C-alpha cells in the first residue's frame, strides 16, 4: 500500500509538467546605413554614383574596389577598353558567371539597355552558396567594357548573407542606371 501511494505521488508530480517546446529560430537584425549617393570622384573613362557609406579603392588600369566595411563585402570593378574584341569580352564575362553553376541553385539574368547613354549590359544574380552572388557587365559596345562582381569576406552561406546581397543589389542597379561614359 505504501508503494502504491508513493507511485501515485510520483505520477502526479511528473505528469503536471508543461510540454517542452523547442525555441523558435533567432534571426539576425542587421542595420544598414541609409542610402545616400555621390558621384565617383576618381578620373576614369566612366562615371557613376556610389554609396557614401562605402570606401573607394583606386586600382591600376582604371579598375576600382568599392568596399562595404560594415558588411565585410566588396564590389570589384574591372575596366577594359574595347578594341574590336567585344565578343571576346562578353564571352569571358559570361564564363566567369557560369563558373558558379557548381554551387549555384539558380542564375537569374536581367538585361540593361539605355540607348541614350549607350549603356548595354546584363546583371546576374546567383542564388546558393556561390563565391559571388551578383555579377554584371556593361558596355557601350564600341569603346568601353566594365565587369563587376560582389564578394563577401566570409564562407558563402546564402541564407545568412541574403539581406546584405539585396542591400548591395540596389547599389549595383543605381551604378548601372547612373553610368556615363567619359570621353
Image (spheres, rainbow, N blue to C red):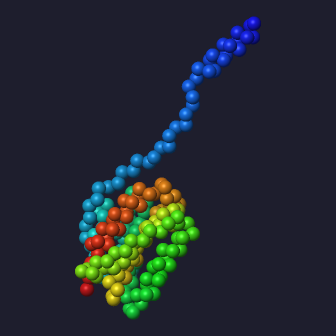
| Residue 8 drawn above or below residue 183 | above
Residue at the far top in the pictured view? 1
In the image, 79: left or right of 18? left
Asked whether residue 130 is in view, the answer is: no
Instruction: Please state the horizontal and vertical placement of residue 152, each as a whole percent of the image.
Output: 46, 63
Instruction: Please state the horizontal and vertical placement of residue 111, each as a whole percent of the image.
Output: 37, 74
Where does the N terminus fall, quadrant-wise?
top right
Q: Closest to the observer: 97 or 131?
A: 97
Q: How many marks?
A: 0
Residue at the far bottom in the pictured view? 84
Q: Closest to the observer: 42 or 127?
A: 127
Instruction: Please state the horizontal and vertical placement of residue 100, each as a whole percent of the image.
Output: 53, 70
Q: Quadrant of residue 163?
A: bottom left
Where does the C terminus fall, quadrant-wise?
bottom left
| Residue 153 drawn above or below residue 27 | below
| Residue 36 drawn above or below residue 114 | above
Q: Quadrant of residue 137?
A: bottom left
Q: Closest to the observer: 127 or 167?
A: 127
- Residue at coordinates 48% horizontally, 63% vertically from top-left? 127
- Residue at coordinates 53% horizontally, 66% vertically from top-left? 104
- Residue at coordinates 39% horizontally, 84% vertically from top-left? 80
Q: Closest to the observer: 50 or 69?
A: 50
Instruction: Please state the horizontal and vertical placement of residue 70, each as a whole percent of the image.
Output: 39, 57
- Residue at coordinates 68% horizontally, 13% vertically from top-left? 8
Asked whether residue 74 is in view, the answer is: yes
Amino acid at each position: 500500500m505504501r508503494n502504491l501511494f508513493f507511485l501515485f505521488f510520483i505520477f502526479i508530480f511528473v505528469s503536471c509538467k508543461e510540454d517542452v517546446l523547442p525555441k523558435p529560430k533567432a534571426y539576425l537584425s542587421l542595420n544598414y546605413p541609409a542610402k545616400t549617393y555621390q558621384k565617383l570622384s576618381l578620373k576614369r573613362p566612366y562615371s557613376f554614383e556610389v554609396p557614401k557609406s562605402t570606401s573607394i579603392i583606386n586600382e591600376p588600369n582604371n579598375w576600382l574596389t568599392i568596399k562595404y566595411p560594415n558588411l565585410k563585402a566588396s564590389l570589384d570593378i574591372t575596366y577594359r577598353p574595347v578594341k574590336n574584341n567585344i565578343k571576346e569580352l562578353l564571352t569571358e564575362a559570361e564564363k566567369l558567371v557560369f563558373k558558379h553553376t557548381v554551387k549555384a541553385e539558380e542564375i537569374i539574368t536581367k538585361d540593361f539597355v539605355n540607348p541614350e547613354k549607350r549603356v548595354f549590359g546584363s546583371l546576374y544574380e546567383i542564388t546558393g552558396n556561390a563565391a559571388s552572388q551578383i555579377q554584371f557587365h556593361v558596355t557601350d559596345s564600341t569603346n568601353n567594357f566594365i565587369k563587376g562582381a560582389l564578394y563577401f569576406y566570409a564562407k558563402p552561406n546564402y541564407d545568412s548573407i541574403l539581406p546584405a546581397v539585396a542591400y548591395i543589389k540596389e547599389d549595383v542597379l543605381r551604378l548601372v542606371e547612373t553610368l556615363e561614359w567619359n570621353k
